[in-house]
Image (tube, rainbow, N blue to C red):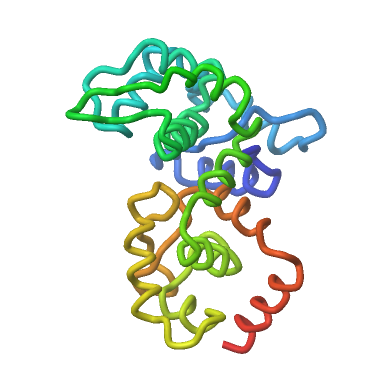
Amino acid sequence: QWIDALSAQALTMLAERLPELSLVVGSRPPEEGSGTAATEFCQSVALQKLSLGALNQARTAEVIGHLCGLASVPDELSQLIQRRSDGNPFYIQQLTLELRESGHIEIVGGRCNLRKDIAERVANALPGTLRGVITSRVDRLGDDEQLVLKVASVFGRVFSEAGLSAIYPIAQQGKRIVEVLLGLLGSNLLTRETADGESGYAFAYALVQEAVYELLPMAQRKRQHGRIADW
């Protein structure tokens, strides 16, 4: 995301007061009108810039191989995904998982088998946006998994098991909630995280949480926010 003026000012102050401190900052290049502080920070002579471009086909194949446990990835697959994702690493990940979960990629004995219509699937049948791909993956989950994710999304990106159980719309489901959460850890949708000083969970990316949250009707959002306030 883009760096805001307040963050740029804080980082500039830290760099000036603690010159021995090494700061690593990730940001998009500032847009016009983003503020003098952000622009000056990004143009600072003391800043060493590392520009991260799109992944090429070879790097895309490495990401696919890591996700699917493959030593070798078919050129057709890496080319299709690289072109569709424009080399965006997160998009590559989500496209790969979507194709695998939909049965268009099959892993057998460490080898990758592709359905004959995979090119058509990638070109025409997949959602046209990254958010759409995430939503498609969530829609393919079971009812319990979808409900857990939707309720958890009301907390934001990070949430605790206790909080989720407290506002869950179905009573006495604590054991089942734990089972679902543990299962979702292998989906690349959730990760382990610390919440309120306790071991908890987090959506793997902010965009995942946002996409899931938008699946909730407005009335349910208000109801769940009310439960959090009362908790």
Q: Residue furthest right?
A: 33
Q: Residue at x 42, y 81 (%)?
A: 173
Q: Which one is nearer the viewer's eye here, 88 or 111?
A: 111
Residue 195 placement (x, y as % from top left): 43, 70
**Residue for point 54% across, 23% down:** 122
In the image, what residue occupies the spot 77% across and 36% down?
34
Residue at 38%, 65% in the rendered image: 181
Left or right: 34 with respect to 228? right
Where on the picture, by quarter, is residue 131?
A: top right
Q: Residue 54, how many percent across, how many down?
A: 51, 19
205 left or right of 71 in image: right
Residue 139 vs 124, above or below: the answer is below
How far across and how far down the image is residue 91, in percent? 52, 31
The quarter of the rendered structure image containing the C terminus is: bottom right
Q: Quadrant of residue 162?
A: bottom left
Choose between 55 and 196: the one closer to the eye: 55
Residue that protrudes farthest toward the front in the picture: 116
Give the number of marks. Answer: 0
The vertical placement of 202 against 78, above or below, is below
- In the rendered view, tell whether residue 146 sits above or below residue 225: above
Q: Nearer the viewer, residue 225 or 147?
A: 147
- The image shows residue 19 at horizontal and vertical percentages of 44, 39
